Amino acid sequence: MLYKLVDIIVNILICTPCFSESCTPLSCTSTINFVLNSLSWDDAQNYCRAHYTDLVTIENKAMNDQLLIMTSKIYSWIGLRRERDNWQWSNGEPLVYTNWEREYFCAVLQSDGSWNDSVCGEEKPFMCYKGKSRLSLC
């Protein structure tokens, strides 16, 4: 499916700690792009994978807080989804940091910075990242 969307690009270089001896103390590996156009979670993931790398993966509270500011507190899809009763990031990274209660299948960043799950077919703005996975660098 082709999309003709105008991305509201708010580039933020995200610096996150790397947990390997081969990495520098801070690995700045991703740029985050906020897409204001609303899509379902699946369509948002397809769009991110076609134009960037994937839906955003939130690794810690500091990153969560930066994304909240970037989105102006608009509910936005993040790359977290429940598959076979397990929550996983769409890029395959392990789920280490969480900030939510769960009932449905796809995750959103809420206006207060906490996460909530939502029906995956609902259309919402979303965030993509472009860069290498922290796991692939270490």
Image (cartoon, grey):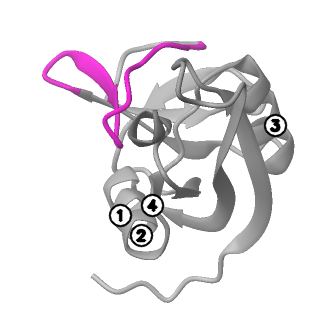
Q: Quadrant of residue 19?
A: top right
Total labels: the figure holds: 4
Residue type at mark 3 is Gln
The residue indicated by pointer 3 is 66
Mark 1 residue element: helix
Mark 2 residue element: helix
**As drawn, is 61 to the left or to the right of 122?**
right
Q: Are marks 2 and 1 in contact (CB under 8 Å)?
A: yes
- Which region of the structure is painted magenta? 83-99
Q: What's the distance in space between the residues labelled 4 and 3, CA to CA?
A: 19 Å
The residue indicated by pointer 1 is 43
- The mark found on residue 47 in the picture is 2
- Does residue 2 lie above or below 103 as drawn? below
Q: Nearer the viewer, mark 4 or mark 2?
A: 4
First-in-chain label (4 vs 1):
1
- Measured as percent of width and height from the top left, residue 66 is found at 81, 37
First-in-chain label (3 vs 2):
2
First-in-chain label (1 vs 3):
1
- The mark found on residue 112 in the picture is none
Residue 41 appears anywhere in the view: yes
- Measured as percent of width and height from the top left, residue 114 is found at 68, 20
**As drawn, is 71 to the left or to the right of 98?**
right
Mark 4 residue element: loop
Q: What's the distance in space between the residues labelled 4 and 2, CA to CA?
A: 9 Å
- Measured as percent of width and height from the top left, residue 3 is found at 42, 84
Residue type at mark 1 is Asp
Specify few, some or many for label 2: CA neighbours under 10 Å numbering under 14, 14-19, or 20 or more: many
Q: What's the distance in space between the residues labelled 3 and 2, CA to CA?
A: 22 Å
